[in-house]
Image (cartoon, rainbow, N blue to C red):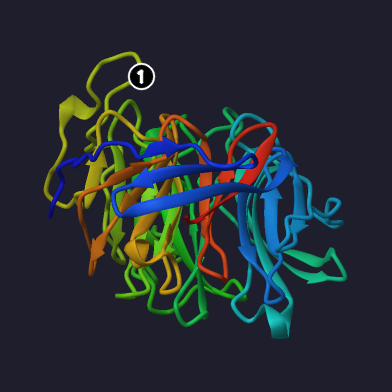
Amino acid sequence: MERRTLLAAPALLLALPAGAQGFRARDGQFRVTTLAEGLEHPWGGGFLPDGRLLVSERPGRARLVSPEGRVSAPIEGVPAVEAANQGGLLDIQPAPDFARTQEVFLVTATLVQGGALTRLSRARLVDGALRDVTPVLDCTPAQSRGRHHFGGRLAFSPDGAHIFLTTGDRNVDRQRSQRLDDLAGKIIRLTRDGRVPRDNPFVGRDGARGEIWSYGHRNPQGIAFNPATGTLFSAEFGPRGGDELNLIRPGLNYGWPEVTYGREYWGPAISGGRTEGPGFEPPLRHWNPAISPSGMGFAPANAPAPWRGSLFLGCLNPMGVVRLPMQGDTPGEEERLLWDQYRIRHTIFAPDGALLLLTDHGDGRILRVTAA
């Protein structure tokens, strides 16, 4: 597999009329406008059939944003969250059949007896409020110390029958990622009603949780299916360097913390500096220095022509967006967009093909990127 880091020059900014910003990318010119503002650390979201965007704010609020950019008052019924450090209200997604079911799935950092954990819940969005909020899965065991590495990103399978959830290692005991009786540091697969599918890779194995789809993850905050191939991808934070793009297959071990391209934040190598080993699936791409990848998405068929089929990664540090053109499941030479301009928590494509970017700030915005 290709594991080198390929780097193209960042896109150049262009002057546009007031209220807009432009940049020249590798394949054309693009315009950036602010769709909405005044959000506090927007984290996740998805579109309803009527064109409104359901978006989460990490402190524990959810809102609806109209196609014109009007931001609603906070939605009633959001469950309590542990809004500390990286915790809070994380991803929120309407179900693929929302028009019929009105179902919404959300991920929270939640306090329970014994500490905090990542929780998946299901609710109905009715008349602008969440109703019948029901916990679907608590990613146990809870952890008393630390409020980091919750993971928390959601994706629905292409047929809409299954839901995938990322969880982080929680940053205290890294070996949780390797333990199959522990739901930290995993990608989890469930049916929409929270049952464990019988074809999950560890069903029936002694000492293993049947919810697990893959393991050995540090803190994956990006997950998406490639619509061209149906393959699941994830992006995860490394430590100091070693951020990864992974092609996810059931039952595979992605290595953390036994192998990594990163180092401790204070300098020393991790696990003796091993970057590969038998039984560990290598990343499809890794970055060193880090790019801190978060939410990700594939450009649909109605996106600007040069971008169609590309994978977009929101980046937190350095700030910006990475675009990876795809040939099937093989990423090509990356392009960096809006680099050092905006801290991007998530990338979402609108129904009209525009790229929406959630900026991770206390005065967060939703940026709209279109061809100029």
Q: Residue at x 63, y 39 (%)?
A: 18
Tally of numbered tags = 1
**235 up-or-down from 47: above or below:** above
Residue 135 x/y as whole percent: 70, 61
Across and down, in percent, residue 48 comes to 68, 71
Q: Say whether residue 206 is visible.
A: no
- Whether residue 333 is visible here, answered yes or no, is yes
> Please, what is the three-letter code of the amino acid marked with disc 1?
Tyr
Relative to residue 142, is residue 232 depicted above or below?
Answer: below
Residue lying at the far front of the rendered structure: 17
Asked whether, in this view, residue 128 is left or right of residue 204, the answer is: right
Residue 13 in the image: x percent, y percent? 43, 36
Q: Residue at 29% of width from left, 75% of height from top?
A: 229
Q: Name the one closer to the observer, 264 or 17.
A: 17
Residue 336 vs residue 121: left or right?
left
Residue 304 picture quarter: bottom left
Furthest residue in direction top, as rendered: 266
Q: Nearer the viewer, residue 87 or 128?
A: 128
Residue that mark 1 sits on: 265
Quarter of the figure with residue 68: bottom right
Residue 99 percent location from the top left of the image? 70, 82
The residue sitting at 40% across, 51% down in the picture is 29
